[in-house]
Image (cartoon, rainbow, N blue to C red):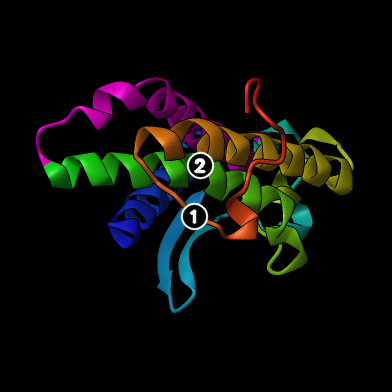
Amino acid sequence: MLLLAAAVFAVVHESIHILVAVAFGEFKEFHLKPYGFEVEFKTPVSERAGAKWGIISGSSNFITIAIGYVMFLLRKRMKNLQNINLYILGYWLTVCFLLLDPANLSIGPFIYGGDINGIAVGFGLNQYIIQAAFFGLFLFNRELIVQKLFPLYNVETKHPLFQPLLKRKGS
């Protein structure tokens, strides 16, 4: 189910890039690469400037994270789904939509660049400030998952990466 949730996330994320690029007349091609999906734009990277590049690059991140929060708010309803496959898929979709784009914009740039370049150039912001902000969001969302989603789905782990960073009152 995790792989299905990650695939759904990737399709949603890249589809938003495509839709926004089409709206700006910048969509050229879509590629399926060994390492993942890639949306190619008409304007070469060296010529990109202006807020439209921040919007094209950042809208998919904003929307997928927003979907993650909606799913998080609906977590109790999803937990009560009668179909076990939908129940499990809802859990993994929530995790993916809350964590993948904050990781993509905070840790990902050190490995592969990605959307951060268009956001930084488009909005005239320092890349490291954006990365730091999204790392904070990653930690916040991780804490939501550890403290609210795990207990709801009866997930128990002793793995150090999935222990609460902040102690809840009464614990």
Residue stretch rendered in magenta on the structure = 55-83
State the residue lying farthest toward the front: 170
Q: Is residue 60 magenta?
A: yes
Query: Who is closer to the viewer here, 44 or 9?
Result: 9
Main SS of the magenta segment?
Answer: helix
The tag earlier along the polypeptide, 2 or 1, is 2
Q: Is residue 2 left or right of residue 165?
A: left
Placement of 48 over or under 136, stated as above or below: below
Q: Amino acid at mark 2?
A: Ala
Give the residue number, with chain letter if any, for mark 1: 157
Q: What's the residue at 58%, 51% (across, down)?
A: 162
Placement of 27 over or under 72, stated as above or below: below
Q: Can residue 60 be seen at all in this image of the molecule? A: no
- Helix, strand or loop under label 2: helix
Q: Is residue 117 left or right of residue 81?
A: right
Give the residue number, with chain letter if any, for mark 2: 21
Q: Is residue 55 left or right of residue 156?
A: right
